[in-house]
Image: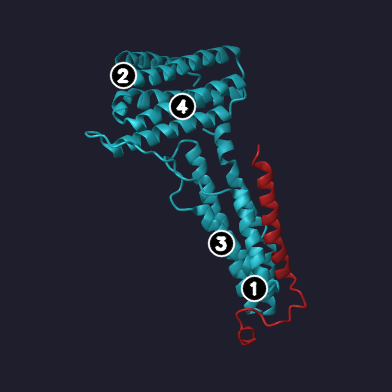
Chain colours: A red, B cyan
Amino acid sequence: MATLPLRLLGLGLLTLAILIPSCQALFPREGAGAPRPFTPGFVRE
Amino acid sequence: MVHLSRARAWAPAVKTAALFLLPFPLGLAAIAALVTGDLYRLALVGGALSSLWTAGVIAFRALAAEARYFLGERPDPPAVPLKFLSALLTALGVALAAVAGGHAVSGALVFAALGALGHAAFYGRDLRPPRINVAMVEGIDVAAVTGQLKQAYGRLRGIDAAAHAIAVPEFRERLARITTTGREILGAIERDPADAARARRFLHLYLDSAERVAADYARTHRQARQDALDQNFRKLLIDMEHTFVAQQRALVERDLVSLDVDIEVLNARLTREGPG
């Protein structure tokens, strides 16, 4: 079936796009000390 | 009546499990944010989780509606672009999760684009409703003919779904030829809707019986392969092919009187000798 590789690629992309930020949200990077988006510090900067 | 063609049509809906299971770490992140009292992160993580799960619900509804459409159980695919909505929510959920994970807005947008792209490739695009352009002819109720044609196209999709579940290549090919001829007949009716009145028995009676017989065979064939049943079904398929071709020819030659009698006889045979 010609669409199978496309579906597998889609699943791979979706997995990476959801899992990576989800895991990073669980274990936030320490270097992320910069002002967070949508906060007063971020707006001032 | 659960059989293979139904299972095949519904199988894509299982794929929506990805949108419910993959964000699992976000649930733990929400608990962690709650424990540490980080309300900002909790809001982001909660927003991401609810966006992704809502995207999953919408994608499931889209794929379930498509399955019913392919089985001929509904005349049209969903009018609202549900998969597109689901992709947008996925992108939003991924972006919120990325921001919660410490990414800048630009990084979050990259993840959002990846998520939307993956969604489109994995679940496919929204189905477009088939164009049924019934020509305007004086004295013909175009809306009624369009409704009849939608129903007839649905029955042909039902035959296609049953054919996919049949393991015997010869039967699949015969059914494919039958539905191809059926679509040509419906195309002829679109061009000249006056034919709809003449092909009434074909549209209502015969297509319905043909779909039922094909679905019954697909179901019983799965349970037990019997030579007598196969032989009987082969004869019915040959008769069906002849009737479809005869219907097509009759529409061209405007000779419907004798064909209606043939259809009556064949329909009685389908009802009497069908595998169900």
Instruction: Please name which of the two marks, 2 or 3, marks the residue nearer to the observer.
Output: 2
The chain ID associated with circle 3 is B
Numbered circles on residues, count: 4
**Eyeballing the image, is B125 above or below B143?**
below
Residue B113 seen by the camera: yes
What secondary structure is found at the residue carrying circle 4? helix
Count neighbours of disc 2 (C-alpha within 10 A) and say few if under 14, some if 14 to 19, many if 20 or more. Answer: few
Q: Are marks 1 and 2 in contact (CB under 8 Å)?
A: no
What secondary structure is found at the residue carrying circle 2? loop
Residue B30 seen by the camera: no
Q: Which is nearer the N-term, disc 3 or disc 1?
A: 3
The chain ID associated with circle 4 is B
Q: Which is nearer the N-term, disc 2 or disc 4?
A: 4
What secondary structure is found at the residue carrying circle 3? helix
Q: CA distance from mark 3 to mark 1?
A: 17 Å
What secondary structure is found at the residue carrying circle 1? helix
Quadrant hosting residue B204: top left
The chain ID associated with circle 2 is B
Q: Are marks 2 and 3 in contact (CB under 8 Å)?
A: no
Residue identified by numbered label 1: B105
Judge by depth and name the residue closer to the eye, B50 or B62: B62
Q: CA distance from mark 4 to mark 3?
A: 38 Å
Q: Are marks 1 and 2 on the same chain?
A: yes
Residue identified by numbered label 4: B211
| Residue A1 circle label | none
